[in-house]
Image (tube, rainbow, N blue to C red):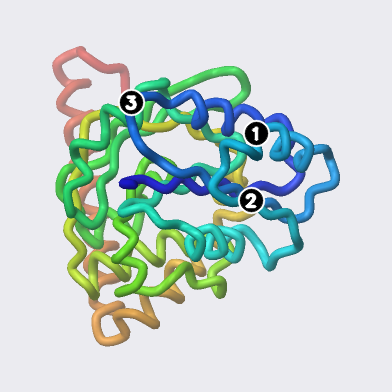
Amino acid sequence: MKISIVTVNLNSKEGLEATMASILTQSGVDFEYIVIDGASTDGSVEVIMKYADKLAYWVSEPDAGVYSAMNKGLERANGEYILFLNSGDRLMTANTLANVQCFLNGIDLVYGNMRYEKQDSFYDANHYPDKLSLYYLYEHYLPHPATFIRRELFALVGNYDVRYPICADWVFFVKALSLYRASYQHIHETIAIYENDGISAQPENQDKIKRERLQALQELLPLYVDDFLVDFDLRRTFRELKRKKIFRLLGRFGLLNI
């Protein structure tokens, strides 16, 4: 069995049903499906029970948050690769897993593209780079619902650190890539549709995200973080100046009103 898919849910009945339907209609590939529910009271358990015979494992019980629930799913997973597709997110097509499985050949992190959904509209995020750097990750992220993680990488790096209630997946990726030199590959395939209303997408959590990221860098790279942050600010300032220069040139030639 090559792929384990884990879905965590808390009181998101409609989102859970959409997620489960997108996974259970996959064809042409061997996978197992695990659902971790946080003791929902909105009818989610009834949805799970409807598909229970198709699940490798499921449970509904209180947990300590989304990453605690994801760690529970991780402990039950038997696949060579794990994909976390949480309630509300869906795989792009019924052939997504079949299209991706040929890339799951020992590389630690295999990430594709992701389509964002918000208020009945869609937009694709195809900006994920083929080459990753700490500069990129500090400002951005890997698309968690579109990233297949080799299970053995968790044995090396550790499970999700629940001290970071919003950014534990980001912390895991930074730790894996920076400290353990995890191998990675970007594939130009849209893997998942992401319901863009999770905790990391909420405006009121943006300051918390910055604080968690900075805390993680100070813990993981204490001798490097101050120089890195200065260099990062200089790079960002240079990019902004370069962008303004391009805009001025466009305006000079009448191609842009500025």
Residue occupying the point 30% across, 66% down: 153
Q: Which mark is residue 241?
A: none
Q: Which residue is mark 2?
A: 58
Q: CA distance from mark 1 to mark 2?
A: 10 Å
Q: Can I make out residue 18 in this image?
A: yes
Q: As shown in the figure, which amino acid type bears the numbered disc 1? A: Tyr
Residue occupying the point 23% across, 70% down: 178
Q: Give SS at disc 1.
A: loop
Q: Give SS at disc 2.
A: strand
Residue occupying the point 19% across, 40% down: 103
**In this rendering, position of residue 38 left or right of residue 240:** right
Q: Is residue 220 above or below residue 43?
A: below
- Which of marks 3 and 1 precedes in the sequence? 3
Looking at the picture, tell me which residue is in the foreground, 240 or 19: 19
Instruction: Residue at the far top: name it.
Output: 254
Q: As shown in the figure, which amino acid type bears the numbered disc 2? A: Trp
Q: Give SS at disc 3.
A: loop
Q: As shown in the figure, which amino acid type bears the numbered disc 3? A: Gly
Q: Which residue is mark 3?
A: 28
Tell me the quarter of the image containing the C terminus: top left
- Which of marks 2 and 1 precedes in the sequence? 1
Q: Which residue is mark 1?
A: 51
Q: Is residue 94 above or below residue 140?
A: above
Q: Can I make out residue 199 in this image?
A: no
Q: Position of residue 247 (x, y in %)?
A: 23, 29
Q: Is residue 47 above or below residue 160?
A: above
**In this rendering, position of residue 39 left or right of residue 220:** right
